[in-house]
């Protein structure tokens, strides 16, 4: 059911304020009647009924004002006709005040449908009064008086009521818009928190998880080695990876706890460390990294950061699941930088679809590139795993978020923007 229909079907509400106003009008009727101030009406030289009858009619009209706000149509249907009758036949001045109130209340407090209906009825009644004066052959002064009274008593309360109603509706609309804007701000804040949470999760996965994977791998390897020198090298590599993980974890905790806004964690992640991790997994790993990759004049800092994160994820996967031979190449060609990491894998090994593979695509997309990972067949026919990423050297999307801002400021962010999956 529409709101206006529900309002019309609701029981009339009588408030204390309405009772007070109705009592004030009743007192005004009695005071004016007792003072003798009044007119003769329009039907003859004198009132058509006695003063007690006029007072009774006006008090009945005042009683209908008890529902002036909860059910204004009651005042319109009761006080309106009684006031018009008194103006025509009785002449009490209080009738004009009650007629004003009867026309104003439906426009001010009624539903839009009630306001329009009462406005139309009032205008038709005013026009009918003027037409009746003309048809009845009333003298010119009387016709002029009818026109003036009808125009003033109809137009003034209606125009005033609609003006106040429009201002009230505009205020409510502004309040609703303010509420929606507040909800939108809360939603944006929640999305920002969610994006930051995902970014932190990706950082932990790319950096900390990579170091811990190296710790687990070399610890297990050391336990199976009989050569003391090889065991010592494996344990040293494991210790270095653990220390790097601890430093990165402390850096992230510092940023999240008490670092000023905008400070980025200083992670121990670079291409030499990633190359060392691959060589620890496969001493004969083929690694070729273009030195121009770290030149900000040729590769935007945001692209460097995204490529480093993609490389960290690819190296972690190669350490954890891959086998020798391993090959990593990063080259600049035709305005773009291409990363290609391939490693052998066990035949029939299940292909995962976890956070790491999604992180590759998100980080590449954040700087306007693309990345993919999946099983391939090596040249010798053996099963292998390949990670490919192609990123633009200096092109950053206009709405690239933190990545674009980092590119403009010349900083190397550690947390490029990650879009929700």
Image: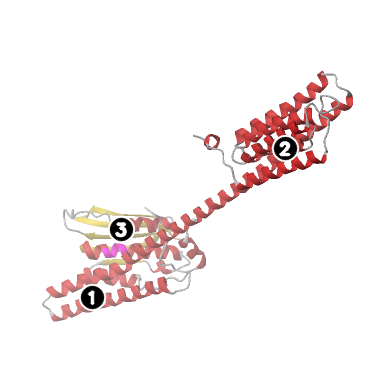
Residue 88 point in image, percent of width and height: 78, 28
In the depicted view, which residue is nearer to us: 4 or 256? 4
Left or right: residue 417 versus residue 386 is right
What is the chief secondary structure element of the magenta stretch?
Answer: helix
Q: Do the residues labelled 3 and 1 touch (CB within 8 Å)?
A: no
Residue 334 in view of the camera: no
Residue 391 point in image, percent of width and height: 40, 58
Give the label, 2 or 3, closer to the camera. 2
Number of residues whose C-alpha sits closer than 10 Å to that of mark 2, classed few (under 14), some (14–19) or many (20 or more): many
The circle drawn on residue 238 is 1
Q: Residue at x 20, y 70 (%)?
A: 217
Give the Cα separation between the discs numbered 2 and 3.
Answer: 75 Å
Q: Tag 1's secondary structure?
A: helix
Give the Cα separation between the discs numbered 2 and 1.
Answer: 94 Å
**Residue 275 position (above or below residue 144):** below
Task: Return the disc, 2 or 3, that comes first in the chain's sequence.
Answer: 2
Q: In which quarter of the image is residue 228?
A: bottom left
Q: Does the magenta stretch include residue 10?
A: no
Can you identify the residue that label 2 sits on? 98
Give the Cα separation between the discs numbered 3 and 1.
Answer: 24 Å
Number of residues whose C-alpha sits closer than 10 Å to that of mark 3, classed few (under 14), some (14–19) or many (20 or more): few
Q: In which quarter of the image is residue 241?
A: bottom left
Q: Tag 3's secondary structure?
A: helix
Residue 137 point in image, percent of width and height: 85, 19
The circle drawn on residue 285 is none
Can you identify the residue that label 3 sits on? 355
Give the label, 3 or 1, closer to the camera. 3
Q: Quadrant of residue 113?
A: top right
Q: Tag 2's secondary structure?
A: helix
**Residue 307 position (above or below residue 136):** below
What span is in magenta? 312-316
């Amino acid at each position: 059911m529409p709101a206006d229909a529900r309002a019309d079907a609701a029981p009339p509400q009588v408030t204390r304020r309405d009772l007070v106003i109705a009592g004030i009008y009743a007192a005004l009727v009695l005071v004016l009647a007792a003072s003798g101030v009044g007119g003769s009406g329009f039907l003859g030289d004198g009132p058509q009924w006695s003063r007690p009858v006029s007072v009774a009619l006006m008090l009945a009209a005042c009683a209908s004002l008890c529902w002036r706000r909860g059910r204004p149509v009651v005042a319109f249907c009761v006080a309106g006709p009684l006031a018009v009758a008194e103006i025509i036949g009785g002449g009490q001045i209080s009738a004009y005040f009650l007629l004003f109130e009867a026309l104003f209340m439906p426009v001010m407090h009624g539903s839009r449908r009630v306001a329009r209906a009462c406005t139309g009825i009032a205008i038709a009644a005013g026009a009918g009064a003027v037409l009746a004066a003309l048809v009845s052959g009333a003298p010119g002064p009387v016709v002029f008086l009818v026109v003036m009274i009808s125009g003033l008593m109809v137009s003034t309360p209606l125009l005033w009521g609609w003006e106040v109603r429009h201002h009230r509706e505009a205020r409510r609309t502004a309040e609703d818009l303010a509420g929606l804007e507040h909800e939108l701000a809360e939603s944006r804040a929640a999305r920002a928190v969610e994006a930051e949470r995902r970014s932190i999760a990706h950082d932990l996965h790319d950096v900390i998880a990579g170091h811990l994977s190296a710790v687990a791998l070399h610890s297990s390897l050391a336990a199976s080695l009989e050569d003391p020198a090889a065991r010592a090298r494996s344990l040293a590599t494991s210790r270095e990876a653990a220390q790097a993980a601890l430093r990165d974890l402390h850096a992230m905790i510092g940023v999240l706890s008490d670092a000023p806004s905008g400070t980025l964690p200083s992670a121990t992640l670079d291409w030499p460390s990633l190359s060392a991790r691959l060589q620890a997994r496969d001493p004969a790993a083929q690694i070729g990294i273009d030195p121009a990759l770290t030149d900000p004049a040729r590769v935007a800092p945001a692209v460097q950061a995204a490529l480093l994160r993609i490389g960290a994820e690819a190296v972690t996967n190669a350490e954890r699941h891959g086998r020798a031979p391993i090959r990593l190449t990063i080259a600049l060609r035709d305005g773009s930088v291409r990363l290609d990491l391939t490693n052998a894998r066990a035949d029939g090994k299940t292909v995962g679809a976890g956070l790491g593979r999604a992180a590759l695509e998100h980080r590449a997309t954040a700087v306007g590139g693309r990345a993919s990972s999946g099983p391939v067949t090596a040249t010798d026919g053996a099963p292998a795993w390949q990670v490919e990423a192609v990123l633009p050297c200096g092109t950053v999307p206009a709405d690239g978020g933190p990545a674009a801002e980092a590119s403009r400021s010349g900083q190397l962010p550690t947390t490029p923007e990650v879009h929700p999956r």
